[in-house]
Image: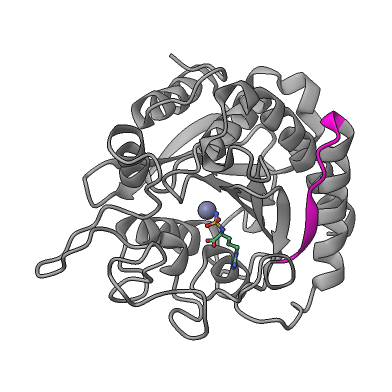
């Protein structure tokens, strides 16, 4: 059963999504493919007003960052079960939400190794398990920095770009369905939730150069972080990944979404905290983290609408 006083299993989280889709005409599930360990990945679509603008949110691409799926499901629950309160923002977009982008890793972190980061793929003759899915995207894959080609490294980029099933599933759903020529709701925003550090990051991560739409990206990030601060005083810095989180990193999903999938507003948001608990954020912070981030998503989404 779903709550926001605890972290939940992948099955509980997908059951929560299925239940929303079963109970609400405006919600539906897209099964986007199986993981290496055969878990079905499920994207929840929320389409209350047939909006033409798509908004992607994912979480849980790094296994140990448990606050990320928890905050994403908190936002889903607010959008659906407190719809009247958020109606203007919910109606303005067609939402595609994937709370757990790396379910195999997430379950392994719950059951065996709390600080696991990567996927759980294995290959013959390779003595370490998994790939960092946030180094595995094809945009500038293994080209610049911030990855490792040692199979045992926590930032192992993989034997090829998009070697990981979870990365392939996201890429093909986004490219073939959401960004297709005939798509009724191309993505205008792509938000990726990680932890921890409390920062709101735009592309690029692979270069110090500023993206072409830097000023618009910063305007939206500033609106988001200002709204976050108003809720509990939590201060999120914003900037490009290269500015805020050096060293440079290539092969991350955000740079792919901006560079290859051509989504105009792409952010990686690193949730609570700043390191006191780090990845082991106590579950009694889920609600507060969810509330401030709901405010951040809403305010930034409204700013996107002002710009578009
Ligand atoms: O290094 C990462 O993948 C992310 N940080 S984490 O501690 N959650 O692992 C940050 C990714 C930011 N985006 C880029 N550098 N492109
Ligand atoms: Zn992460």
Ligand 1 falls in which quarter?
Answer: bottom right
Rendered-image quadrant of the C terminus: bottom right
Rendered-image quadrant of the N terminus: top left
In the image, is residue 307 above or below residue 158? above
> Can residue 219 be seen in this snapshot?
yes
**Residue at (57, 20) in percent of width and height:** 4
Q: Position of residue 83 (x, y in %)?
A: 71, 22
In the image, is residue 88 above or below residue 214? above
Q: Is residue 278 left or right of residue 90?
A: left
The quarter holding residue 103 reads top left
Q: Is residue 226 left or right of residue 123?
A: right
Residue furthest to the front: 276
Q: Is residue 137 magenta?
A: no
Q: Is residue 239 magenta?
A: yes
**Residue at (59, 70) in percent of width and height:** 255
Instruction: Give the residues in magenta.
Output: 231-240
Q: Position of residue 145 (x, y in %)?
A: 52, 80
The quarter holding residue 12 reads top left
**Residue at (41, 61) in percent of width and height:** 133
In the image, is residue 100 above or below residue 13? below
Q: Position of residue 11 (x, y in %)?
A: 34, 27
72 or 91: nearer the viewer: 72
307 or 270: nearer the viewer: 270
In the image, is residue 216 above or below residue 80? below
**Residue at (88, 59) in percent of width and height:** 219
> Can residue 182 be seen in this snapshot?
no
Q: Is residue 195 left or right of residue 294?
A: left
């Amino acid at each position: 059963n779903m709550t926001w006083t605890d972290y939940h299993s992948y099955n509980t989280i997908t059951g929560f999504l299925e239940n929303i889709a079963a109970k609400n005409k405006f919600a539906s599930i897209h099964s986007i493919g199986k993981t290496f360990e055969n878990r079905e990945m499920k994207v929840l679509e929320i389409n209350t007003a047939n909006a033409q603008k798509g908004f992607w949110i994912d979480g849980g691409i790094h296994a140990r960052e448990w606050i990320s799926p928890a905050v994403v499901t908190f936002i889903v629950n607010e959008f659906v079960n407190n719809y009247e309160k958020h109606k203007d923002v919910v109606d303005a977009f067609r939402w595609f939400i994937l709370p757990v982008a790396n379910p195999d890793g997430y379950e392994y972190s719950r059951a065996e190794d709390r600080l696991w980061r990567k996927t759980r793929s294995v290959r013959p003759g390779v003595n370490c398990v998994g790939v960092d899915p946030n180094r595995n995207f094809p945009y500038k894959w293994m080209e610049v920095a911030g990855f490792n080609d040692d199979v045992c490294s926590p930032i192992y980029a993989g034997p090829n770009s998009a070697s990981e099933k979870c990365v392939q599933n996201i890429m093909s759903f986004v490219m073939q369905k959401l960004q297709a020529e005939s798509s009724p709701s191309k993505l205008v925003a792509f938000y990726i939730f990680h932890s921890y550090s409390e920062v709101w990051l735009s592309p690029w991560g692979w270069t110090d150069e500023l993206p072409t739409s830097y000023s618009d990206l910063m305007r939206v990030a500033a609106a988001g972080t200002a709204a976050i601060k108003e809720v509990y005083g939590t201060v999120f810095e914003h900037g490009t990944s290269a500015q805020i989180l050096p060293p440079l990193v290539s092969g991350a999903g955000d740079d792919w979404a901006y560079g290859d999938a051509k989504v105009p507003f792409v952010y990686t948001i690193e949730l609570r905290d700043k390191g006191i608990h780090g990845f082991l954020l106590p579950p009694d912070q889920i609600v507060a983290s969810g509330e401030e981030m709901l405010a951040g998503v809403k305010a930034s989404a409204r700013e996107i609408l002002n710009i578009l």
